[in-house]
Image (tube, rainbow, N blue to C red):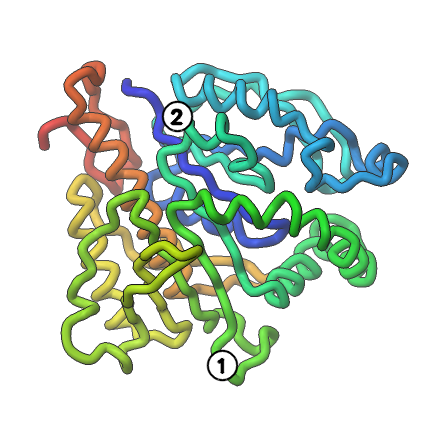
């Protein structure tokens, strides 16, 4: 096997990292994907952080040097003994032996923090939902899964804001794709639910699929728009997908992306684009299309590596029964 392809997903607490990565893993096959969370590399447990008055988001609260060493090992297909942080009670527990599969998702708060870390990713994604939306997600998650009260979560958000500004948000500029979920104009975040819009900033640091059909004619009423823009002063493509986009329009964009991935048989969208709000499951076209676009980029890197003259011989990639194998030259 060639070395693994590593996808980095970074964002603040409750930005949607796990939701994005689950859909990606469902598309490629969970048996082909290893997931690693950089939040496991905390130096201190919850009680120790409280005593030291330090945030889990702070560089000094995390073993960044060990993250770097483990990313290097994963990059070369080597196993790691990964620490484990138990979010439910804030304790550090027995480490986990991790052997990377063909695709590795590294998600967490600080994954792009150093230049050494960044060099080991093949695709880098930063999640930047509207802050009011992220706060709502965090309250729902931490009250239903982590034993906090709503007031405790809001107080933690207030206390963490300066640390987020210092350590989390600066990582945005290193991403190849920036993902911004936001409520439609005139709709509250509570009402938006599965109708959240998404705005994708596609930087030219990686080649994106040909979506030029979106530039043809008048697509203003289609619910999907592609335009040229600037981000941090640099030219970018901006792909916007409305939460109420029609199923036909969503399928047209999905088909345009799938045609660039002939190695995979197109999955029914019901297999991805799903999330749980703590009460019930929902499906979102913008979420599904975001996960599909990320899959395209990871698979492109996989195929680029296959075509390199110095790449090792390629064995067929085992897939779930619903997919065809990826074989060099096919």
The residue nearer to you, when weighing 223 against 325, is: 223
Instruction: Give the class, few, some or many, for how many residues have Cα within 10 Å of label 2's Cα (few <14, many ≥20).
Output: many
Q: Quadrant of the N terminus?
A: top left
Q: Residue 181 in the image: x percent, y percent?
A: 48, 64
Q: Residue furthest left?
A: 330
Q: Is residue 18 visible?
A: no
Q: Which quadrant of the view contains residue 143?
A: bottom right
* Rendered residue at 71%/56% (across/down): 144
Residue depth check, mark 2 versus mark 1: number of the one nearer the observer: 1
Q: Earlier in the sequence, mark 2 or mark 1?
A: 2
Asked whether 149 or 208 is in front, the reply is 208
Identified at 74% across, 56% down, the residue is 157
Q: Which quadrant: the C terminus?
A: top left
Residue 101 is at least partly visible in this image: yes
Which sits in the foreground, 213 or 236? 236
* Label at residue 302: none
Q: Position of residue 48 (x, y in %)?
A: 85, 32
Q: Position of residue 261 (x, y in %)?
A: 20, 45
In the picture of the structure, the residue carrying the numbered disc 2 is: 101
Q: Residue at x 72, y 25 (%)?
A: 93
Q: Is residue 276 left or right of residue 178?
A: right
Is mark 2 in CB contact (under 8 Å) with mark 1?
Answer: no
Looking at the image, residue 46 lies above or below residue 153:
above
The CA span between labels 2 and 1 is 42 Å
Give the residue number, with chain letter if any, for mark 1. 185
Q: In which image quadrant can residue 56 be found?
A: top right
Residue 140's place in the image compared with 32, above or below, is below
Q: Residue at x 41, y 60 (%)?
A: 287
- Packing grade of label 1 (10 A; few <14, some 14-19, many >=20) is few
Does 56 sit left or right of 305 as displayed? right
Dot 1 falls on a residue whose secondary structure is loop
């Amino acid at each position: 096997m060639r070395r693994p392809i590593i996808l980095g997903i970074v964002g603040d607490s409750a930005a949607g990292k796990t939701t994005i990565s689950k859909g990606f893993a469902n598309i490629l096959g969970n048996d082909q994907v290893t997931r690693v969370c950089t939040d496991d590399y905390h130096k201190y447990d919850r009680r120790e952080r409280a005593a030291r008055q330090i945030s889990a988001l702070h560089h000094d609260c995390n073993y960044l040097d060990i993250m770097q060493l483990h990313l290097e090992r994963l990059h070369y297909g080597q196993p790691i003994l990964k620490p484990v942080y138990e979010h439910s009670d804030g304790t550090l527990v027995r480490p986990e032996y991790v052997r990377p599969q063909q695709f590795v998702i590294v998600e967490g708060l600080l994954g792009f923090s150093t230049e050494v870390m960044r060099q080991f990713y093949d695709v880098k994604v930063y999640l930047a939902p509207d802050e009011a939306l992220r706060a709502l997600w965090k309250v729902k998650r931490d009250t239903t899964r982590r034993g906090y009260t709503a007031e405790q979560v809001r107080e933690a958000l207030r206390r963490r804001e300066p640390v987020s500004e210092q350590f989390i948000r600066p990582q945005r500029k290193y991403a190849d794709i920036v993902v911004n979920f936001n409520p439609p104009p005139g709709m509250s975040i509570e009402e938006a639910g599965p109708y959240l819009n998404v705005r994708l900033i596609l930087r030219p640091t990686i080649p994106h699929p040909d979506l030029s059909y979106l530039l043809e004619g008048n697509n203003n009423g289609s619910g999907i728009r592609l335009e040229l823009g600037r981000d941090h002063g640099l030219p970018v493509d901006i792909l916007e997908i409305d939460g109420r986009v029609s199923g036909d329009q969503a399928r047209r964009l999905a088909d345009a992306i799938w045609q660039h991935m002939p190695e995979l048989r197109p999955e029914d969208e019901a297999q991805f684009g799903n999330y749980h709000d703590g009460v019930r499951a929902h499906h979102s076209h913008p979420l599904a299309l975001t996960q599909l676009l990320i899959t395209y980029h990871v698979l492109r890197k996989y195929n680029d590596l296959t075509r390199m003259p110095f790449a090792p011989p390629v064995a067929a990639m085992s897939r779930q029964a619903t997919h065809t194998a990826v074989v060099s030259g096919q």
